[in-house]
């Protein structure tokens, strides 16, 4: 009985907060659309980004794109069953390193976007859905359009992206294979070290 | 060319076939040591020769001309794309692809411009490996082909058919204009170089993203091919790795239960003659019940626990 009451009290603040949060939240497809539009506009205008100024691109990604990603969820998915075997500190370290790696990669990809156009497909979701896929297509002249699908989940604050599929290739799934291998060979700390090494190597390459 | 490739592949198999498998084998990649060797070879070749050539081509040839080259080979490729659509039973896509050839060849200046895309006829990428996939042929083992890169047993078979159907080959072979062999070689090389150039941005990202590029490319390859075969909307993949653990645990429990049963039966038989049961611990029933309860808990979804 006491436990039930405790649970009720724990949920109470959520119940109070939920309605206003729901009222102001943006629909997932509208969110992705406005963010990509904004980012692409900046990339097209900014000569520094186009000529490969990594620092500036990373800054753009960190301020505009990052807030809409749930990196803990992404890292947990990429880790698979190993996630639960990691201590909270290890989980924090993994999330940190994975985030750094993805930001850098994404920034590189972004600077190559120039004459691409993005089409968004109508969202197929029920009103009560907490988990949706926002589908978009990047069109380049003379080539088959590349699909970019965002898996999104409704969180307390807003909709957040937890996986991106480019041409059917899921970011999370692709990393899961490597992560599983690394953990099998060097444990969770081994994977953290590999990620740290990779990030350090990318950071030093960028300074040159 | 293909025969030489096959010989090369066979050599690679012989060279690495007896090597021990890597510490964490992927069930889709039983030939991992050989594949890794070919991957390294391709990577070296790319770094030393192909990528610099592609970068030079990108630097020298203006982007409009490169788009025209992409369009030209894309237009020729659409003939075979359409044929594959038809073999896969996709009539609408077949009409789309051959209409593209018609419009791009005429209004698009022999295929140099992709007017069809602007008319609302999108470009598709099909190949015979995908057609085999649609027909239900599983990908089989992962294979890294020399020069051409990631493939599978099925897609290599498809690739051989694609090579015969490659328009630059058969158009020149059937029409046999003067110097057709050198035309064939230079056009093929141009197509290859142009494709590599189009992929430069992608490989740069890959270089940054992957901890282990080999495993990364392999995973991406299988996902991409699956996605292509289902034309962009594959059914959700069954997580084969997850239920494996409970199954194993259930099997283990089952084995223990059977052993206990056998032991119990044994003592029962023996007890008929001598009535000695000193080795059974006091909490035997409790242990049995707990084990059975755990087996039942792990049981649902494991149809074979009932059978044995």
Image (cartoon, rainbow, N blue to C red):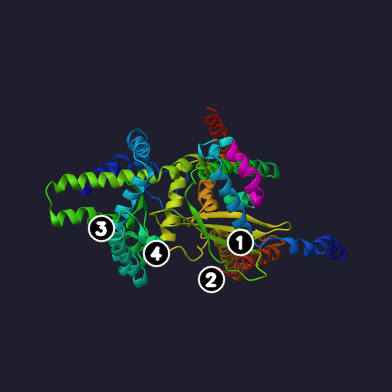
Q: Secondary structure at mark 1?
A: helix
Secondary structure of the residue carrying numbered label 2: loop
Residue on which disc 2 sits: B303
Badge 3 and badge 2 in a common chain: yes
Say if residue A175 shows up in the picture.
Answer: yes
Chain letter for mark 3: B
Q: Are marks 4 and 2 in contact (CB under 8 Å)?
A: no
Majority secondary structure in the magenta region: helix
Residue bounds of the magenta highlight: A56-72
The residue beneath circle 1 is A29
Between B105 and B95, which is closer to the camera in this rendering? B105
The residue tagged 4 is: B119
Q: What's the CA distance linking mark 3 and mark 4?
A: 31 Å
Residue at horizontal 14 percent and vertical 56 percent from the top: B175
First in sequence: mark 3 vs mark 4: 4
Q: Nearer the viewer, mark 3 or mark 1?
A: 1
Q: Which of pointers 1 and 4 indicates the residue nearer the eye?
A: 4
> Do the dots labelled 3 and 4 sit on one chain?
yes
Q: Is residue A62 magenta?
A: yes
Q: Are marks 2 and 1 on the same chain?
A: no
Q: Residue at x 62, y 51 (%)?
A: A76
Residues at marks 4 and 2 on the same chain: yes
Q: How far, Cα to Cα, is label 3 from label 1?
A: 41 Å
Q: Nearer the viewer, residue A11 or B227?
A: B227
- Residue A59, image x and y in percent? 62, 40
For label 3, the residue is B161
Residue B261's x, y, as percent?
58, 67
């Amino acid at each position: 009985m006491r436990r039930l009451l405790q649970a009720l009290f724990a949920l109470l603040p959520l119940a109070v907060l939920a309605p206003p949060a729901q009222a102001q939240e943006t629909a997932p497809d509208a969110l992705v659309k406005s963010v990509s539009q904004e980012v692409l506009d900046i990339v097209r205008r900014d000569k520094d980004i186009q000529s490969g100024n990594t620092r500036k691109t990373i800054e753009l990604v960190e301020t505009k794109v990052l807030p809409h990603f749930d990196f803990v969820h992404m890292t947990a998915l990429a880790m698979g069953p190993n996630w639960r075997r990691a201590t909270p500190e290890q989980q924090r370290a993994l999330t940190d390193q994975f985030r750094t790696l993805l930001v850098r990669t994404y920034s590189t990809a972004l600077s190559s976007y120039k004459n691409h156009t993005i089409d968004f497909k109508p969202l197929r979701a029920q009103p009560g859905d907490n988990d949706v896929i926002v589908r978009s297509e990047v069109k380049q002249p003379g080539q088959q359009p590349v699909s970019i699908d965002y898996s999104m989940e409704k969180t307390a604050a807003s909709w957040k992206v937890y996986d991106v599929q480019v041409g059917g290739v899921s970011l999370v799934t692709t990393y899961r294979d490597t992560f599983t291998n690394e953990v099998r060979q060097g444990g969770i700390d081994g994977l953290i070290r590999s990620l740290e090494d990779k990030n350090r190597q990318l950071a030093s390459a960028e300074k040159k | 060319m293909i025969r030489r490739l096959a010989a090369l592949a066979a050599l690679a198999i012989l060279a690495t076939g007896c090597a021990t498998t890597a510490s964490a084998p992927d069930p889709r990649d039983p030939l991992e040591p050989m594949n890794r060797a070919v991957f390294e070879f391709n990577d070296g070749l790319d770094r030393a020769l192909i990528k610099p050539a592609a970068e030079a081509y990108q630097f020298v040839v203006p982007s409009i001309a490169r788009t025209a080259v992409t369009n030209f080979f894309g237009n020729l490729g659409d003939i075979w794309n359409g044929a594959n659509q038809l073999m896969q039973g996709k009539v609408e896509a077949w009409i789309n692809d051959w209409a593209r050839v018609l419009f791009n060849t005429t209004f698009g200046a022999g295929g140099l411009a992709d007017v069809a895309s602007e008319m609302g006829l999108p470009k598709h990428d099909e190949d015979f490996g995908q057609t085999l996939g649609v027909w239900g042929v599983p990908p089989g083992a992962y294979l890294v082909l020399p020069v051409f890169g990631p493939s599978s047993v099925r897609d290599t078979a498809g690739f051989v058919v694609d090579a015969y159907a490659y328009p630059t080959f058969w158009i020149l072979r059937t029409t046999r204009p003067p110097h057709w062999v050198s035309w064939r070689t230079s056009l093929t090389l141009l197509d290859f170089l142009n494709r590599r150039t189009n992929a430069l941005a992608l490989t740069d990202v890959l270089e940054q993203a992957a901890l282990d590029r080999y495993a990364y490319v392999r995973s991406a390859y299988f996902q991409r091919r699956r996605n292509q075969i289902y034309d962009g909307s594959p059914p959700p993949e069954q997580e084969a790795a997850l239920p494996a653990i409970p199954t194993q645990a259930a099997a283990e429990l089952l084995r223990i239960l059977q052993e206990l049963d056998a032991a119990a039966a044994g003592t029962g038989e023996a007890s008929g003659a001598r009535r000695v049961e000193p080795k059974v611990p006091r909490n035997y029933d409790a242990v049995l019940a707990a084990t059975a309860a755990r087996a039942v808990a792990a049981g649902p979804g494991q149809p074979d626990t009932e059978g044995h």
